[in-house]
Each structure stands twice: as structure tokens, then as C-alpha cells.
Image (spheres, grey):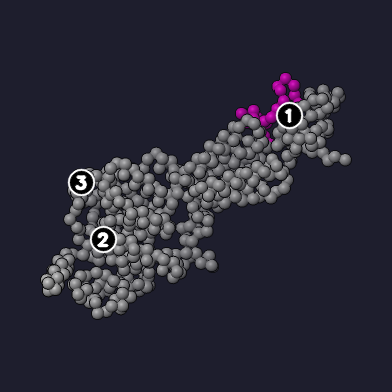
Amino acid sequence: MHNLRLFSSVAVGVFLLAAPVGSAKEPVKYNRGVIIRFQGEILPGLETYLYRKLDAAKQLGADLVILEIDSPGGRLNESLEIAEYLQKLDWAHTVAYIPREAISGAAIASLGCDEILMAPHARIGDAGAIVMGKDSLFQLAPQKMISYLAPALRSLAEAKHRPPALAEAMSDKDLKVYHVRNLKTGLETYISERDLKAKPDDWKNLGAVPASGNDRFLALTGREAAEVGLADALIGNREELAKRYSLGELHVIEPTGVDIAVELLNGWLITGLLLIVGLTGLYMEVMSPGHGIGGLVAGACFLLLFWSHFLGGTAGWLEVLLFILGIACIAVEIFLLPGTIVPGLVGAALILLSLVMISQGFLIPETPRELHTLAGTMAMIVISCSIFVAAAVVLTRRMDSLPLLNRLMLAPPAKETATEKLLATNGTTGPGVGDLGVAHTPLRPGGKGRFGEQTIDVLACGDFFDRGTPIRVVRVTGNQVLVEAVEER
């Protein structure tokens, strides 16, 4: 019986050895296959886009999902999350098809698929992590991060029956990988130098993988990946893909209108425009309370802003909460504690923080790409706020003369001008400037002032005033009466 088992093991080893490394298994019959293009830098937006397209594939009844990957990589967390999501996906067979390149994070995402198919000259690998050092220069990640990433890649490879050492070598530039044969079973595989030295009597060394170790992260072409068993087959185009799975046609899931809108709204130009219009709308609402038009415009802009960045993967409920708290702090400064400054500064800081976070999905950059993104985000916010301040100045000075907007200003009835009311109140023929009165309602900045027996619409100049504040007319321009507070003696 022992000899029979030994003969069976040797026979299995000979059979596996006779098959070329990376050869395709007997294809399974699939009913519906779809292609999802996975292209560009791996950022939160691409991650959420992939999840939406996977949901669409599931609704279509697909049992074969092919990710057509062409990416230079991107953020590590998103790459690992995508790989783990694909690894656990159980309603379809997943394939990473790489016609050109899957580098860094894209290589990590590929490891989560059931199969990896590559064009002969495509490239995969080079998944070393980099971080920002204390000197603000980018450098290779410390050993602590490597010790976290390497086991994660090994686990992904083991789950899909790929040589774990090859996946680990993508993130460890010092790891040397060897082609070995098990002396007991005759099976060939690839293991690290560390594992080879641990049990030298179990393996016959057939040679090192040239692309591993030597102070470089493992990166392979399609042919090399197929030879070492990292890629399951070489595929040149979509026709070969369809033929491999015995499907006459592969349905390509295209971006929808929502995807296009999210991509446009997440761009810095549109984001900055929404920010400018939204802040201007809020300012108009404060300048002319009660009309609601400015508030509606601001609400629509900020709703679009957060909705698009929610779907883009850079916004969450934390950012929304920070923004709402910021608005609340500024409201406290304006309506409850005018002149205290602190609530306003805190509110402005919270709003700025939320805008930075929704625009990029991180706060402190750790890679060159993130540093570039942060610089662009800050430039967009500074430019948008500068334009808003300029617009606010123009509105403050010229709102009463601008078409349409002048209707939002608080004004007295058309039959009698403010000057006429003041003249009637004082019983003189002199100008209204300098007349004393009292704030009949809170002036924030618009409201009503009482001069003698007459109540008219006025506009506070400078700080906002509470009801009962002594006021004095400083300027009368058409239907607009500007007043200032007078200290009681």
C-alpha cells in the first residue's frame, strides 16, 4: 500500500511537471461574460467606479467578469481593498486581463482575481510601497510597512493558488526567489531564499528568478509571468479572450451618465466653481435674509459637491459633519455672538478641512502623487475663496444697482423713498444723514430702524446689531439707508 501511494504521488508529479508552467486549465463553460475597463491611477474614485460596475455586471447576470487592467498603480489602501473584494467575490469567475501594464497597486489588485491573463509584452509587478519622510522627501517604506504588505500579498497569492514568494517579491526588493523541485514529490514551484535555506534537504535548486532581489522589486513581462506561473495564459486581444471561454461575444460595460457626471464634478475646475457659487449664495442669503434664493442656490451647489465626491470615493459622513459644524459655528458668530471672532475662525477652519478632505480623500500626503494632489487641492481652494471674496465685495457695494440682484435687497415701499421718510420723520428739509434712531429689529445686516414715529428699512454698516441698538444714518443712496451703531452716553 505504501508503494502504491508513492507511485501515485510520483505519477501526479510527473504529470504536473510535463505540463508547461502557466498553462491554462480546462475552460469552464460560462453563460455570460462582461468586460470592465480598469484604467488610470488607482484612487478612491476608481475604486468606487469598479464597485458600481461590478454591481451592474451582477444585475446583468454575468458569471464571468474580466477586468481589462491598464494602470500604473496608485494608493496602497485602495489597491488592497480592491484585491480583497475581488478575492471574496463569489457570484462570478474573475479575470485580470493585462494588455499593457499592471504596475504597483494594479498588480496587487490583479492578485485578487481567479485568473491573470497577459499580453506577451505586458508588464506586472513592482509593488513596492513609498512614503514621505521627515525631510519631506519620498523614500521607500520602512520595514514595518513591508512586513505588513508582504504577508498580505502572500495571502492573496495563496488564496488563488499562485506561488506566494513571487507576490511577496513584488513588494520586497531584497527577496530572492528560486525555481525549485520538491525532492519527495517531484513538484516544481517557486520559493524564497529564506524558505529554501530553512529546508535545504527538501528542495532541489533549479535556479534563481533573475528579476527578483538585487535591490529591485519583482516585475515581469507577460511571457515571464506565464513561465513562472504568475499568469495563467498569454492573451493578445479580446477575440482571444472570447475564444478562451467559448463565448461568441463579451459585453463591455460602458460608463453611464452618472459616472460621467461624477467624473466631471470631481474635477478641480467644477469643484471650484461649485464652491464659489455655493459660498456666494450663502453670502447673499445673509445679506438679504428671508428671500431664500441665496440659500437654495448654496444648498444645491453643496449638495452636488458632496454627492459627486461621495460617489467619487473621497467624501464620507465625517466630511459632511465637519462641513455642517463649520456652517453652524459661523452662524453662531453672525447671529448669536457677533464680534467674538472665535466661532467664526473655528467654523472657517472646519469648512476648509472638510473641503480638503472631500477633494482628495486624505489629509497628509504619503506619496508623490498625493503631494501633487494636495498642492492642486490647496490651489483650487485658495483661488475659489479669492474669487468669492472679490464677488462678496462687489455684491456689497453694487448689489442695489445690479439687475435682478437689486430685488433681493431690503427696500422701503416704492411710493415713498427712504429720504422722504426721514424728512417726514424729522419735519425738516435737510438731508437724513446724521439722524438718530433705534434698531427696531435685529440688523443682520438688513432689518428695520425706527426714527421717531416712522419705521423704515435700513442696512447695517459694519457689525450686525441687535434689536434696540441706538443707530445713526451715515448714508442715503436711492432706496438704501446705511446706518451705524451709536454708543449710549
Q: Secondary structure at mark 3?
A: loop
Q: Secondary structure at mark 2?
A: loop
Real-space Cα separation, disc 1 to disc 3, in angstroms:
76 Å
Residue type of the residue flagged with mark 3:
Leu
Mark 1, other Cα within 10 Å: few <14 / some 14–19 / many ≥20: many
Q: Is residue 405 left or right of residue 150?
A: right
Please state the extent of the stretch shown in magenta in the rendering. Answer: 397-418
* Residue at image coords 50%, 59%: 365
Residue to which mark 1 is pinned: 457
For marks 1 and 2, the one nearer the N-term is 2
Residue 398 vs residue 173, the one in the foreground: 173
Q: Is residue 329 left or right of residue 145?
A: right
Q: Quadrant of residue 183?
A: bottom left
Say if the magenta span includes residue 64: no
Say if the magenta span includes residue 411: yes
Q: Is residue 55 left or right of residue 410?
A: left
Real-space Cα separation, disc 3 to disc 2, in angstroms:
21 Å
Residue 197's tag is none
For marks 3 and 2, the one nearer the N-term is 2
For marks 1 and 3, the one nearer the N-term is 3
| Residue 89 point in image, percent of width and height | 32, 52
Q: Is residue 403 left or right of residue 53?
A: right
Q: Quadrant of residue 391?
A: top right
Residue 231's tag is 2
Residue 20 vs residue 462, the one in the foreground: 20
| Residue 349 point in image, percent of width and height | 61, 51
| Residue 338 point in image, percent of width and height | 72, 43
Residue type of the residue flagged with mark 2:
Ala
Real-space Cα separation, disc 1 to disc 2, in angstroms:
77 Å
Kindly tell me whether residue 442 is visible in this rendering.
Answer: yes
Residue type of the residue flagged with mark 1:
Asp
